[in-house]
Amino acid sequence: MSKERDRAPLSTAIPPPESELDLHPSACWTSGLEVPRLQKSADAAAGDGLAIGQMLSGRYRIERELGEGGMGVVYLVSDQQVVGEIFAVKVLKEALDPEALQLLREEVRQTRKLSHPNIVDMHSVNVDGKRLYVLMEYLEGKTLNTLMDEEFGRGMSFSHAWPIIEDVGAALGYAHDHNVIHSDLKPANVLLTTSGKTKLLDFGIARVSRGPLLHKRSGLRALTHAYASYEMLKGEEADRRDDIYSFACVIYEMLSGDRPFGELNALEARDVGTRVPPLAMLTQGQNAALAQALAFNRAARTASVENLVSGLRADVAPRAHPTPAVVAGIIAATAAAVGLTYFALDKLWLSRYSVTVQSQTSSAHQPVFPAGTSATFNPPLHSIAVLPFVNMSGDKNQEYFSDGLSEELLNDLARINELQVAARTSAFSFKGKDTDIATIARRLNVASVLEGSVRRSGQTIRITAQLNNAVTGFHIWSQTFDRDLGDVLQLQAEIATEVALALKIRLLGDVATRFELGGTRNPAAFDAYLRAMQASWRGDENGLQDAIAAWTEAIRLDPGYAGAFAGRSIAYSAYAGTFAHGSAIREFFDKAHRDAHQALTLTPEFVGGYLALADYYENGSLDFAQASKAYDRARTLAPGDAHVLRNSGLFAVEMGHTEPGLTALHRAVVLDPMNPLSHAALMMGLYYSRRYQEAIVAAAEVITLNSDFQWAYGYRGLAHYGLDDLERARASCEAKPDDFGRVCLAVTYEKLGRHADAEAQLAKYKARSGDSEAYEYARIYAQWGNVPKALEWLDTAIRLRNSDLESLKSDPLMDPLRTEPRFQAIERELKFPD
């Protein structure tokens, strides 16, 4: 496929930088305009070039040149009257006569009435002295012709083409319903943005050079002959069936890599009697639908876009939106695995009951919305979600880098006290899904959404970031950054600062220093750190081992990397509490303790270090007073971090600090609404607070998000048990029984008078777990009224340093023991905070 034919008349192409990065000129585009009735005017020429900082109409500041074509130069401009607003402007090289100028303005006015997610926004035609310019939406991505040139020279598969066909069809159908004809549909006017959306450019603009002006100087210059219908080439006024012909030409070329009539246009093909060759990938019915849309005579041509799309829909699999990975060259998008802010490991992950919990939302259920968002959308003004940046590197194995970079940027933003940041798990739950920005914002209850792409080549990266106002739908800010990998930490801080300023948030102190806490400037160490995070998200023993190895490599490369020490510390604690045996348990906890202290020695104000230290004291040494201090410090440093709030909030409830703990847990759900772990922590906190009815509601939300979350059924059963609703307790405990469910079944069966069944559940539990579940056996015996046995198993739990002892102070199942002297002595021994 020739790369010279069918080029956009003018793109906003960024010239390739002088580096090893293979960045194509089409990496950044805005809509190009075909403008008629041009009269040469030397003093009007924008081609002379506008200087950076120069103003158009006293309002739009030139930020940089994006590209130049035969008819004009496109610049990125910032609106000096509305802070944060940016646009693309095409400054024409030549002047228009009054008649053509008026027609151009009318066409833009008509196009501006179109409000559709697949149609680019056109704003206005403006005059600045003798300069004429068109103000339009600034977009980044690749046009379809560039995508086909680079990735699909011989045609793309129907599964990749179909989502684009649907989106373009939706845009065209909407425009036709509003009596707007495109008149110049071609691959160069179909844009796939870096966020995975399809946008149709240049509605109606080409018509300015036809109609009443057709036989004047402009002629047919705005037509792209290869995609123009027979009637348009004959000079007839355009109607919707001409768009359908052009659309069919584009579809045919997408699927085959060739145009339906080769190098012939419609006039030439009709004269020689050329027929459309059928495509082997299509059914007979689909080929017939495409051929009808390519009919030379309007009367025989498909009457509507909907009919064309419907004819092609036969035998199509369920829709999958063109992900940003398609734009990058069919990089397969993988579902986001379990991952949390700062580190992939979580307090609840460490529980033996939740190792296999996944954070994806079940496709069978709608996500749980934050309180107050179901009816109206009124998010906090300074709230944001950071979507996973798209991997544009052309290498699927680089996914860890773009995901990790997105998470680190999210962490930077979460350190801004005035900004409410949706947690990683919820934001990443939309990865690879056909969900628009407005829907994401509603589900996460945020006012703005940051998205972008990452392209890495060796030691060089290009990051494109775009901030969107989710309420108005307008872009707030966007920028492309080219950096050496060693500057990535500074770049993260720079992007975070730009986002904060765009949102009009006042930054206090040395922001860059605050963002860089715990980081590294060693590119290889940073890469190892990101690989460690990806490995830890796998949630199994091999994943933890790989994560520990990668964090160790990061530390070897940069011994001052506090973030790597903190990450490895939490991984050590996770391994000790979940997979280690015998003396190895203590060895791993000791390593976790050393790494946590080293992280804080290197960076005393690093929240990750305090999380690691709290994790060690909570699970490794059972020094709950010290754990409480570490959590308090982490919450002070990161008051808006869902991970910190979830872990510290549940810990606070367990320590008897009910109200502040529940406040933190509710806040974690608001920040991380799509994460079942957030709702599970709230469920547990409500249960330990003896708010059983609320715990049942929270458990239902966990199950809605993940129906395989086994211990949600157990806690729901215990909440029913607490309400003495034994039949509902039994039903919930039996729904998906696991080891924890056996506790629920053992106590419920006993209270129902099913003594043999209760004993059988306890026997199975002991046979499976041995002494390691001593605390759980004590709970069962306490509810059975066997106080000596309960205290005996509590002594065993103390001897084994069982981490479940942290809930002793608030656990409702332990209430029968609270007046026992030995129980009270155990409480004192465990060093609970005041």
Image: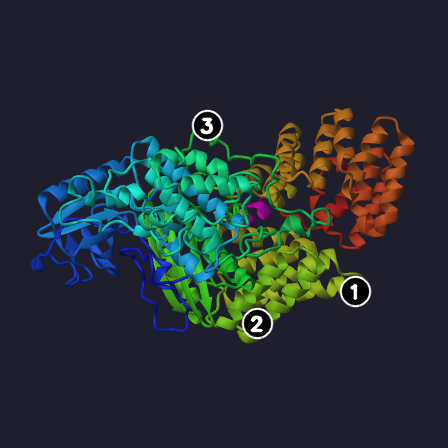
Vertical comparison of 41 with 677: above or below? below
Q: Residue at x 89, y 38 (%)?
A: 760
Q: Residue at x 89, y 37 (%)?
A: 759
Circle 1: element type? helix
How many residues crowd mark 3 within 10 Å: few (<14), some (14–19), many (20+)?
few
Give the foreground label among 3 and 2: 3
Q: Disc 1 designates what residue?
A: 583
Task: Using the image as rendered, state which of residue 72 and residue 535 is in the foreground.
Answer: 72
Label number found at residue 135 = none
**Mark earlier in primary sequence (3, 1):** 3
Q: Which residues are magenta?
A: 643-649
Task: Using the image as rendered, state which of residue 121 and residue 686 is in the foreground.
Answer: 121
Cα distance between the residues tagged 1 and 2: 25 Å
Q: Disc 2 designates what residue?
A: 555
Give the foreground label among 1 and 2: 2
Give, as a three-letter code, the residue at label 2: Ile
**Residue 532 x, y percent position in the rendering:** 59, 64
Q: Residue at x 49, y 63 (%)?
A: 394
